[in-house]
Amino acid sequence: MSEQRPAGRPRSEKLRVGVLASGRGSNLQAIIDAIEAGALQARIAVVLSNKKDAQALERARHHSVTDVFLDSKPYAGQPDSREAYDRAILEVLRKHEVELIALAGYMKIVTPVLIKAYPHRIMNIHPSLLPAFPGLEVQKKALDWGVKIVGCTVHFVTESVDEGPIIIQAAVPVLEGDTADTLSERILAEEHKIYPRAIQLYAEGRLRVEGRHVLVAGATEATTASLMNPA
């Protein structure tokens, strides 16, 4: 029998989200904007970064969201340094009563410490149509392979990097003359749409994980029209 696990539940209070970020935090900003526009029934309980100068922390402060810089260097000398650091993160998340973790440009691999504490309650966004092109330098890989359609994926985080159950994806055509930068910019615009949407589906209690599949209750299916490139 396939595993069936609810990945969200109907709520009377707003979902408390903890965001982990290492850089500029553009996806964090998209989540904040969706909350302020009323499109996402959640609140960001805390933004945590492993980088002191991460712009994501500035964005949090600008919107009166609690921000935490947690330096990983003091844990580097420990035998289980990565796990020790994640235990420290877990303390922060529990202090702020975080229910769902959103990774937004978080440049560290999450260990089982967090994954076991938040099973199917950690989301990540990746700038490709997984399982194609996991890892880094995604747009360069896509251009090197000559693919015609790329995109982005929101998925639940598991112990295997970029291999968790897929929640939502958006497709983007590769245009003649595209560079890694231009392609990345168009993909990022779609990331900003689908990440808040995925979190909202969770907040509404509409996600259920069965094995590798995420089932979305009441979802409206896409049309049968295909995206072809070249058209």
Image (cartoon, rainbow, N blue to C red):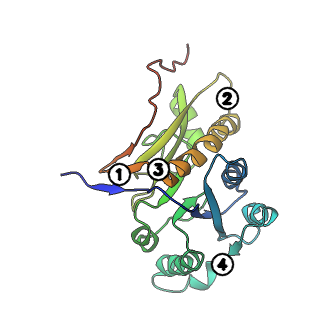
Q: Secondary structure at mark 4?
A: loop
Q: Which residue is mark 2?
A: 178
- For residue 2, say whether it is visible: yes
Indicate which label's residue lies in the foreground, 3 or 2. 3
In this orientation, which residue lies closer to the viewer: 180 or 60? 60
Q: Nearer the viewer, residue 169 or 75?
A: 169
Q: Secondary structure at mark 3?
A: strand
In contact (CB < 8 Å): disc 1 and disc 2: no
Q: Position of residue 178 (x, y in %)?
A: 67, 29
Quarter where residue 112 is shown: bottom left
* Identity, as a three-letter code, of the amino acid under mark 3: His
Q: Earlier in the sequence, mark 3 or mark 2?
A: 3
The answer to the question of whether label 2 and label 4 lie on touching residues, with beta carbons closer than 8 A, is no
- Spatial CA distance of label 4 from label 3 is 26 Å
Q: Is residue 16 above or below residue 140?
A: below
Q: Label 2 amino acid?
A: Asp
Q: Which residue is mark 3?
A: 155
> Where in the figure is residue 126, as x and y percent of width and height?
54, 48
Name the quarter where the C terminus is drawn. top right
Residue under label 1: 209
Left or right of 50, for residue 148:
left
Label placed on residue 71 = 4
